[in-house]
Amino acid sequence: MEISALKVELVTTKRTYEVQFSQMEEEAKSFKASLTWKVQEYEQQLEELRNEAEKINEEVKTTDEEESIKFMKEQEEKKLEISSLKQCSQLEEDAKDAKAELTQKAQEYENQLEALGNNVIVSLP
C-alpha cells in the first residue's frame, strides 16, 4: 500500500508542478510581452529624441552658418568703411597740402606784383 500511496502522491505532485509550471510559463510570457512593449516604447522615444537632437543640430549649424556669414559681411563692411575713411583722410591731407601750396604761390605772386608795382612807381618820373 505504501507504493500505491507514493504513486498517488507522485502523480498529485506532478500535476501540481505541471499547473505551477504552466502558470509560471504564462506569467513569463506575459512579462516578456510587457518587456517587449516597453522596449519598443523606449526605442520609439529614443528615435524621437535622436530626431529632435538632429533637428536641433541642424538648426544650430544653420544658425552658426548664418552668424558666420553675417559676421563676414559686417567685417567686409567695416573694412570698406575703414578704407573710405583712409581715402577721405588722404584727400584731406592732399587738400591741406594743395591749399598750403596755393597759399604760398599766391603769396609769391602778391610779392611779385608788389615788387613790380614798386618798380613801376620807382621808374615813373
Image (cartoon, grey):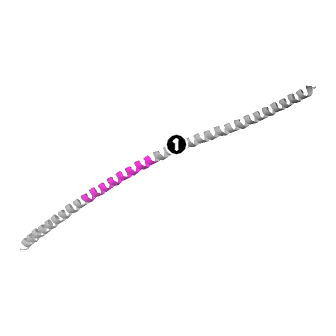
| Residue found farthest to the front | 125
* Amino acid, disc 1: Lys
Quarter of the figure that contains the N terminus: bottom left
Quarter of the figure that contains the C terminus: top right
Q: For mark 1, what is the residue?
A: 73
Residue at (88%, 27%) from the top-left corner?
Answer: 120
Residue bounds of the magenta highlight: 36-63
* Helix, strand or loop: magenta stretch: helix
Q: Residues within 10 Å of mark 1 (few under 14, many from 20)?
A: few
Q: x, y percentage for residue 87?
A: 64, 37
Residue at (57%, 43%) from the top-left corner?
Answer: 78
Q: Quadrant of residue 93?
A: top right
Q: x, y percentage for residue 29?
A: 20, 61
Q: Secondary structure at mark 1?
A: helix
Using residue 33 as the reference point, say whether residue 98 is left or right of it: right
The one of 69 and 21 positioned closer to us in this rendering:
69
Q: Indicate yes or no whether the magenta region holds residue 48.
A: yes
Q: x, y percentage for residue 16?
A: 13, 69
The one of 100 and 75 positioned closer to us in this rendering:
100
Residue at (81%, 34%) from the top-left corner?
Answer: 107
Using residue 46 as the reference point, say whether residue 13 is left or right of it: left
Using residue 8 as the reference point, say whether residue 78 is left or right of it: right
Q: How many marks?
A: 1
Instruction: Tell me if residue 75 comes above or below residue 103 in the rendering.
Output: below
Q: Indicate yes or no whether the magenta region holds residue 28.
A: no
Residue at (10%, 70%) from the top-left corner?
Answer: 12
Q: x, y percentage for residue 105?
A: 78, 32
The one of 57 and 39 positioned closer to us in this rendering:
57
